Image (spheres, grey):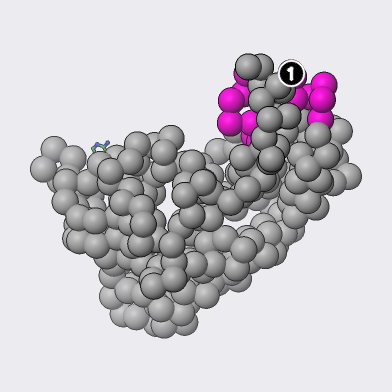
Amino acid sequence: MSFLGSLSERDRVFDFLMPAQSPVDVRHGPILYLEDVTVSFDGFKAINDLNLTIDDGELRCIIGPNGAGKTTMMDIITGKTRPDTGKVWFGSRHNLLAMNEPEIASLGIGRKFQKPTVFEALSVFENLELAMAADKRILPTLTARMVEPVRERIEEVLETIGLTELRHRPAGILSHGQKQWLEIGMLLMQRPRLLLVDEPVAGMTEQEMERTAELLTGLAGKQSVVVVEHDMGFVRSIARKVTVLHQGSVLAEGSMDQVSNDPRVVEVYLGAPDEEA
Ligand SMILES: Nc1ncnc2c1ncn2[C@@H]1O[C@H](COP(=O)(O)OP(=O)(O)OP(=O)(O)O)[C@@H](O)[C@H]1O
């Protein structure tokens, strides 16, 4: 049966408009749970007995010096890197270590890499449309027969990312910040439960940073958001709970004030208080 034919057979139009197929169970605990996770590269422990929990709807900032293991941690959550030991669970139902990358993504874990990867020749709207289709080969068919729920979802996301006015402009003309928001929008099209965002404000203007802070804090609650960022001013502006990674483990965790006054954090990462600003 053709793709469009199959649509008429179904009581719902697109899977992306529905919650993740196998719901994440957070009734008795966090949405993300890492226990005693260790991974070595050629004998070097990039992640070393890491324990981390993220609550449903939480916005968590992860900071730490270069090489602390932040990227490797994200790679483990998304299934790109397999740990040597430990447990990684998404809610109480999904053991992420038993799943591959596409399976993990389909649970509703979206990852935003530092560099934006939008399709520059396509319009903002088309980029969102493209992100919606799990099978990108169906895009031409979809464009010709746009269904209302899809359009509504795109409009909703355009509003969230603040690009409604630019919806018909090619993504190539967007500023760096706008491209980053578009890419976040592309992830939102799939209604993720957990968003992992790597250095979202690198290269942004002050104004773009402020808008990004509003965007990310606005997303929290509806989904869980984990932000890895080096810009301490930005972290301070969005932070609720902050986790400091160092040598592959959690060095400190708490409010921004708590961690930035922790002498161990000052020593390995932030420097003397007067250098912090
Ligand atoms: N595939 C790999 N092979 C060998 N070593 C690796 C590999 N991936 C990461 N490492 C090492 O593991 C450590 C942690 O790296 P990671 O990129 O996770 O740190 P990070 O906290 O993200 O750093 P940054 O802030 O610079 O992005 C580093 O010492 C890095 O060199």
Residue where numbered disc 1 is placed: 140
Helix, strand or loop at mark 1: helix
Who is closer to the viewer here, 256 or 148?
Answer: 148
Q: Is residue 230 visible?
A: no
Location of residue 44 in the rendering, given as x and y in whole percent from the top left corner: 15, 46
Q: Quarter-wise, where is residue 247 in the image?
A: bottom left
Picture layout, residue 68 above or below residue 187: below
At a point 52% along the width and 75% down the height, the residue shown is 240
Q: Quarter-wise, where is residue 42 in the image?
A: top left
Who is closer to the viewer here, 270 or 153?
Answer: 153
| Callout count | 1
At a point 38% along the width and 71% down the height, the residue shown is 29
Q: Is residue 208 visible?
A: yes
Left or right of 137 in this view: 79: left
Extent of the magenta region: 130-146
Q: Amino acid at mark 1?
A: Pro
Report the magenta stretch's main SS: helix
Q: Quadrant of the N terminus?
A: top right
Picture layout, residue 197 above or below residue 106: below
Q: Quarter-wise, where is residue 3 in the image?
A: top right
Picture layout, residue 52 above or below residue 100: below
Left or right of 213 in this view: 85: left
At a point 72% along the width and 44% down the height, the residue shown is 178
Report crowding for label 1: few under 14, some 14 to 19, many 20 or more residues within 10 A (C-alpha).
few
Which residue ends up furthest to the left in the rendered image? 43
Which residue ends up furthest to the front in the rendered image? 9
Ligand 1 falls in which quarter?
A: top left
Who is closer to the viewer here, 144 or 80?
Answer: 144
Question: Is residue 75 a member of the stretch shown in magenta?
Answer: no
Location of residue 161 in the rendering, given as x and y in whole percent from the top left corner: 74, 51
At a point 75% along the width and 25% down the height, the residue shown is 142
Who is closer to the viewer here, 2 or 236?
Answer: 2
